[in-house]
Image: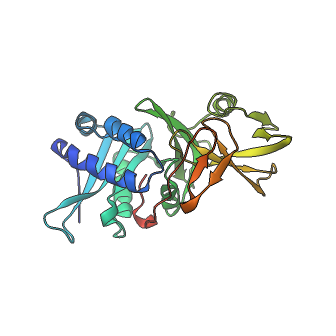
Amino acid sequence: MEIREPDADEAERIRALVDSSMTTSFRLSPEQIDGITDDQFADDAIAAKIDDEDTLLYVVETGDGIEGTAIAGFVEGRLADEWGEVNWLFVDPEHRGRGIGTALYETASDALRERGAAHVCVTVLEANTEGHQFVDRFGLEHDGDRRIEVAEESLVKYVYADGDVDSDVDLPTESRTSESDREADAAGEAFPDTETTDGQLTVTDGSETVYVARDEAESGTAASFFVTYEDADHADQYGFYCSNCGSLDVSMGDMERLECAECGNAHAERSEQSYDDSYL
């Protein structure tokens, strides 16, 4: 296994790796995956990142168990002020379970520190539940979230930072969503038919008010689903809320697949994989 910087002419190989990893494990539609790969990993995008002195890219090339060699892993990091950010990490499904994800994360975080980063954070797409558990292994803690626009689609990334960072050290400017932004978002179209009750997002089902857990999301083909609770303490689960149309008429079918009866928003079953080779 060799970890090295990629060449610009390897963009197609990187894109194939990203597409395979996301198709296998992300709770995103094929159209959403195509949009991300077109926007972030096309030939010109990879070339621009290679030329950007504040961005670092590494790939893992391996010949284990195959004829020739393959790019089995990819990581992207970026310097922003005193912070280093690991914002994409992928491992090919056929090469998971070999420590590639861990090796890439450690290589990227070490390189960011060597380039002057005083702190390191990691961003993980909300759609990637395995990735959240992956970063937990390194002592990183959830410290905000970010809404990003990729290929005219709004997606949420969770931001994880070193647990020992002082509370007065700010994350990169674009990383943390302010409280005012959260309240505006909650009152807007992202959460239709909801209200804010005692600081919590709520929705009414007939005569009953249920509480929407914004930090417990499941990606859908049109918008995210959120777990709902009968009580403000989030002790007794009620069901799921569809943020595409505002409906609570969400069922869980075979293979734990959620589907909204009102608008057809749905998500696919989560794939089994080793957390050691997760992706961000």
Please tell me which residue is depicted at 44% across the width and 29% down the height of the picture.
152
In which quadrant of the rendered view does residue 212 lie?
top right
In which quadrant of the rendered view does residue 106 lie?
bottom left
Residue in the foreground of this view, choosing between 104 and 29: 29
User: Is residue 39 toward the left or the right of residue 175 in the image?
Assistant: left
User: Is residue 222 toward the left or the right of residue 185 in the image?
Assistant: left
In which quadrant of the rendered view does residue 183 lie?
top right
Residue in the foreground of this view, choosing between 107 and 254: 254
Q: Is residue 208 visible?
A: yes
Q: Position of residue 203 (x, y in %)?
A: 76, 39
Q: Position of residue 47 (x, y in %)?
A: 22, 37
Identify the residue at the far bottom of this view.
Answer: 65
Q: Is residue 201 above or below residue 216?
A: above
The N terminus: image quadrant = bottom left
Residue in the foreground of this view, choosing between 197 and 173: 197
Please tell me which residue is depicted at 80% across the width and 51% down the height of the picture.
230
Q: Position of residue 177 (x, y in %)?
A: 59, 35
